[in-house]
Structures are given as structure tokens and as C-alpha cells.
Image (cartoon, rainbow, N blue to C red):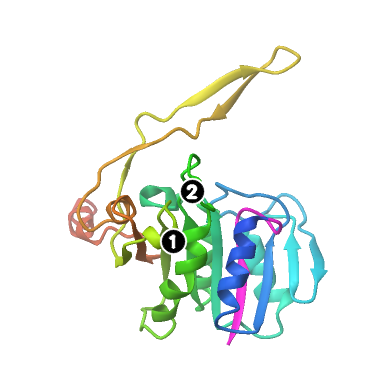
Amino acid sequence: MRILLTNDDGIFAPGLKVLEEIAAQFSDDVWICAPHEEQSGAGHSLSLNAPVRLHTHGPRRFSVTGTPTDSVTLALRTVLDSPPDLILSGVNRGANLGDDITYSGTVSAAIEGALAGIRSIGLSQVLDRNASHDQFDAAGAWGARAIAPLLDTPLPSRTLINVNFPPIAANKVAGIRAVRQGFHDYSRGSVVEGRDPRGLPYYWFGLHPIEHTLDHGTDLEAIDEGFVSVTPLQLDLTHHASLGALAERYT
């Protein structure tokens, strides 16, 4: 089985090393094509206004001066001589839960894989910055267990899987749950204003804790209760229930 690894934290990110160790449990044909620098929050963006360059870091190891989507695109069209059987994106340094997936470069790399018809999984490690354990402990120990059932599970086309690991030691993880996407409350989003050395204003989007509702059966609830969350996502964003009412407006 050929596996392509990517991420949005960059080629030198510690989470990518964890992902390499996870992937090695399934195959020795593992390739890496990741952004050269951190691209957190890049979403499903392409580099359209500047050239993208490909760097080689060793056998089957490449980086791209662009976004996670650029990385997957170049891997499929330039780096690999045949498509991979599986794309793994991560392990992201931080959660990709609820609505956060719309910003996530990690999930978006998996989206690009799904668009190409390849089984794709995004993996993220929720962080507790005050914890004494290794931050990627849960991902390292539970990653293969989360991925293994997904390798032969029938999935519709244009779908992908989003996996999050709770911010606790591996031996404290309660198990794995298949759950739906939850929702955050972004109404309290913060913007930090400052001044540069020339006295000009700048604005920095704050990464403060976001309030969320722990609805039953969601990824947010699963993580809060110490479970690994596994969420199937679809690329069809159409709100089908509204189509009929809208159609009547245009007749």
C-alpha cells in the first residue's frame, strides 16, 4: 500500500514525525509532500499569485513553498509516478473540531485527496498546554487503531474522515467514537490590536478559547469525555432541504 503524508504545520513539524511512525505500521511505501513552512489556517487555498517551488529533503520526502492543497496537488501530479492508496494529513498541532474544519489546512489537504478519489484522513492532536505528558502521546498510541478500521470501510465518493485525539495521556484515552461534527460559538472572536515600530497599527487574530456546546454525539463531546473522535465529512455543501423553497422563488 502506498501512503502519502502531508500536513499544514510544515515539513519539520513534530506531528509529521508522529504521522510517519503511524504510517510505518501499515506500509514501507510512504511518501511525504508537505508545506515548507507552517500554513495553519490556510483552508482549501491554492497559490495562484506566485510560483510554487518543490524542495527535496531525501528519498520520498519533499516540501512545497505553498499551501497544504498545493502540496497534495504537486504530489499527485508531479512527485508520484502513480496515485497513493491512502492520504494521511497531520498530525496537526491543535484541534480541528466543529466549525474549525472550514479553516483547517490539515482537513483541506484531505479534501484535496478526496476530490482526487483517494481515501483521505485528517488527524489532529488536541492540546493541553499545561499538561506534563508528551503532547502527541494520544496520537502516537491511538493513531493506528483509529486508522485501521477505516482502510476497508466502504465510503461514498467525495467523502473524507476527520480524526481528533484528546489532550490526555495515551493510557487515559477512553476509546474511539464515530461522531458528527459539532459547532462552536464564534460570536466572541477576538482581534488583538498593536503598533509596529513605526507606530502603524496591526491586527492579530486571537487564539483564545472558543465557547462551544457539547451536543450529544458530536466530536466536541467525544474529546471532552476523553475519546478519540472519528467524523465522516462530505464535500457536498448543498443544503438540500432548502432547494424546494428556493426553486419556488424563481418560478
Is the C terminus in the top left, top right, bottom left or bottom right quadrant? bottom left
Label 1 vs label 2: CA separation?
Answer: 27 Å
Q: Residue furthest top?
A: 199
Q: Element at badge 1?
A: helix
Report x, y in % for residue 12. 71, 56
At 55% from the left and 72% from the top, the residue drawn is 22
Q: In x, y percent, where is residue 50? A: 75, 51
Let me know if residue 101 is in the magenta part: no
Q: Is residue 58 above or below residue 15?
A: below
Q: Which residue is mark 2?
A: 103
Q: Which residue is mark 1?
A: 170
Q: Is residue 22 left or right of residue 31?
A: left
Task: Return the x and y of residue 100 as percentages of the image width and height.
Answer: 42, 48
Q: Give the amino acid at mark 1.
A: Ala
Residue at point 57%, 28% (across, down): 204
| Disc 1 to disc 2: CB gap under 8 Å | no
Q: Residues within 10 Å of mark 2 (few under 14, many from 20)?
A: some
Which contiguous range is marked in magenta?
Answer: 1-12
